[in-house]
Amino acid sequence: GENVEQHPSTLSVQEGDSAVIKCTYSDSASNYFPWYKQELGKRPQLIIDIRSNVGEKKDQRIAVTLNKTAKHFSLHITETQPEDSAVYFCAASKWIRSYQLTFGKGTKLSVIP
Amino acid sequence: GAVVSQHPSWVICKSGTSVKIECRSLDFQATTMFWYRQFPKQSLMLMATSNEGSKATYEQGVEKDKFLINHASLTLSTLTVTSAHPEDSSFYICSARDPLGVDNSPLHFGNGTRLTVT
């Protein structure tokens, strides 16, 4: 089955700096890669996603890049703010129609004011 | 936007009792729903895939007789934790696939249910 590795497990940045979280996946057939932000005790919130036919996607301060050859994808958050502090999960889905997700282990991001 | 309602948001039960968790898609028909379990400070682990009108598909290591899943309609899936034990205490989250959400947000998560078994 699919295996998703996520690094780092914790990340602390100063407010205004950039944060980068990286994930690798094992199944070359995976074609949908969402990123979720989860605050304590709450549901995961989709912040951005990318499909295998695209190499990069950006939404304001958030961007995701995908390297299909290397099977890795990354989340980039620029101009970080304290409210960006949360746990971020990457995920991969093998079949674009079923969206059965395999999650990474998560990254706890702390933005220091 | 599409909303998935999960109920209850938290429940405390005694060991040996059963607990039912409901997951409803409020404004779309979800042919497929997923149930995840999340232990503290850990990731979401897929328990099973629930398809309307058919038996759920369970992930390896998940006891189907303990975690009963019913997807009787296009808007409702239920997870029943039978004979609950303290080790079943966890955060259970459902997600529903919106078949029309191809380009945006194809999956919608419920708010989760915090189960505590005493």
Image: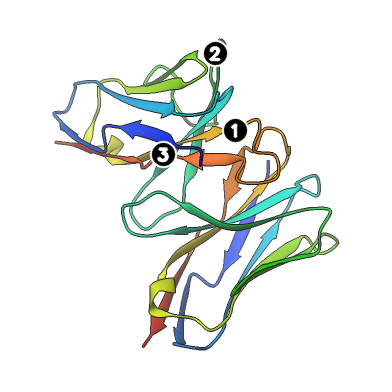
Q: Marks 1 and 3: same chain?
A: yes
Q: Mark 1 lies on which chain?
A: B
Tell me what residue is drawn at x 48 percent, y 53 percent.
A45
Query: Above or below — where is B11 with respect to A4?
Result: above
For the residue pair A70 and A51, the one nearer the viewer reads as A51
Task: Name the chain under label 2.
Answer: B
Q: Give me the disc on residue A79.
A: none
As measured in the structure, the alpha-carbon distance from the residue carrying label 3 to the one carrying label 2 is 21 Å
Q: Residue at x 73, y 52 (%)?
A: A26
**Upstream in the sequence, badge 2 or badge 1?**
2
The quarter of the displayed image where residue A75 is located: bottom right
Q: Residue B86: horizontal and vertical position, in percent?
A: 22, 37
* Of the pair B12 and A56, the residue shown nearer to us: A56
Residue identified by numbered label 3: B110
Q: Neighbour class for label 2 at 10 Å: few (<14), some, many (≥20)?
A: some
Q: Earlier in the sequence, mark 1 or mark 3?
A: 1
Residue B82 appears at what percent x and percent y? 29, 20
Say what secondary structure mark 1 lies in.
loop
Residue identifier under label 2 = B55
Asked if A54 appears above or below A61 in the picture, the reply is: above
| CA separation in Å, label 1 and label 3 | 13 Å
Q: Quadrant of the C terminus of chain A?
A: bottom left
Amino acid type, label 2: Lys
| Pointer 1 residue | B98
The relative height of residue B51 versus residue A2 in the rendered view (above or below) is above
